Amino acid sequence: MQMAQVILALAHVMTAKVDAGEIVATKEFKIPKNSSRLELASLAYNGAVELFAEIANFSINNDSEMLRTGDMWQGHVNRKEDYDALLKKHPELIVDHL
């Protein structure tokens, strides 16, 4: 099984449906090998904070809306059931790596 190599934080235009709005900003960063769950959570949190800071800075300094990237998020929303099924299929996985 191939592990993810990057984490991508996205900022969307707010809509009634989760993750359905147009993307206005992204922040991508590489996942270091053998990262723990805590390290991944920290990377994701820091990436989201950096992205929020960029959006806040734009909002403070501009009267116009942010340009859309033209991308739409097409990923799968993972739920606990998905992780449980993954562990059942691949019991060799260490839960801390998810």
Image (spheres, grey):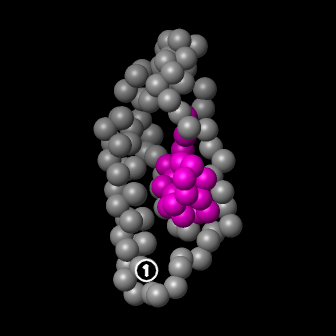
Residue 92 horizontal/vertical position (percent): 49, 14
Residue at point 49% right, 49% down?
7
Magenta run includes residue 26? no
Residue 22 horizontal/vertical position (percent): 61, 62
Instruction: Please state which of residues 79 and 39 is positioned toward the viewer in this rendering.
Output: 79
Residue at point 50% right, 29% down?
79
The picture quadrant where one finds residue 86 is: top right
Decide: is 88 above or below 37.
Answer: above
Magenta stretch: dominant secondary structure: loop
Residue at point 43% right, 45% down?
32
Q: Can residue 33 be seen here?
A: yes
Instruction: Please state which of residues 54 and 12 is positioned toward the viewer in this rendering.
Output: 12
Q: Across the whole image, how many numbered discs are drawn on residues? A: 1
Residue farthest to the front?
Answer: 16
Range shown magenta: 3-23
Residue at point 58% right, 13% down?
89
Q: Dot 1, crowdedness within 10 Å: few (<14), some or many (≥20)?
A: some
The picture quadrant where one finds residue 56 is: bottom left
* 94 relative position to 77: left or right: left
**Quadrant containing the N terminus in the rendered view:** top right
The picture quadrant where one finds residue 36 is: top left
Q: Can residue 19 be seen here?
A: no
Decide: is 69 above or below 14.
Answer: below
* 21 relative position to 27: left or right: right
Magenta run includes residue 5? yes
Residue 88 horizontal/vertical position (percent): 53, 12
Residue type at mark 1 is Phe
Instruction: Please state which of residues 7 and 70 is positioned toward the viewer in this rendering.
Output: 70
**Quadrant containing the C terminus in the rendered view:** top left
Mark 1 lies on residue = 58
Instruction: Please state which of residues 64 and 72 is positioned toward the viewer in this rendering.
Output: 64
